[in-house]
Image: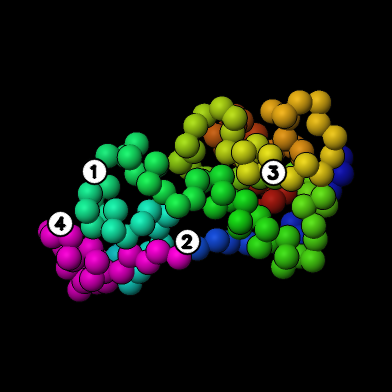
Amino acid sequence: MRPLYLHGLGHFHPENVIDNALLEGLDIGTNQEWILERVGIRERRTVLPLDYLLRTRNADVRAGQEAALYTNAETGRRAALHALERAGLQPKDIGMVVAGGCVPEMAIPAEAARIARPWASRPRPSTSTPPAPASGPSSTCCGRWRACRPTCWW
């Protein structure tokens, strides 16, 4: 079995910031101090336009998906590009895409395959075949990931 190497980690933070003042302004029964004291969070990022949040409070999840500036797969792709840049690698160097998102936009194809799709680093028999093996908790049996734990220590 070939060894697995992790060459880089990446992240992507959408530009829209939801701070505690914005949440307090939504009049949802909370305030800045309560959030900071109990949760410890000052701000978080969102793929949704702030004016959309203020106008709708994201009451309709499907409309929220349509209003989003980025899909889950796109945020994953951007995080992967950041990881590649930090590792000094190119998309063609990817041996496997592992995505750990817990809220996929759709079950099939798996989120990892949708993240990997733009990188045609190797010949593909069809457009639905990812350029590199791609997997994540939502696309395989949980036992597979549990079996990786002793060697990966995650």
Q: In which quarter of the image is residue 147?
A: top right
Q: Which residue is drawn at 56% across and 49% down?
A: 74
Q: Do the residues labelled 2 and 3 touch (CB within 8 Å)?
A: no
The mark nearer the N terminus, 2 or 4, is: 2
Q: Earlier in the sequence, mark 1 or mark 4?
A: 4
The reply to whether discs 2 and 4 touch (Cβ–Cβ < 8 Å) is no
Using the numbered discs, state the Cα–Cα distance from disc 2 to disc 4 in whole angstroms.
23 Å
Seen at 82% across and 50% down, the residue is 92
Residue occupied by mark 1: 59
Neighbours of disc 1 within 10 Å: few (<14), some (14-19), many (20+): few
Write the start and end of the magenta stretch as one range.
15-38
Q: Is residue 75 left or right of residue 41?
A: right
Amino acid carrying label 3: it is Pro
Query: Along the polypeptide, which appears first: circle 2 or circle 3?
Result: 2
Expressed as whole percent of the image width and height from the top left, the position of residue 31 reads: 17, 68
Which residue is depicted at the point 33% across and 72% down?
42
- Give the quarter of the image for residue 132: top right
Residue located beneath label 3 in the image: 118
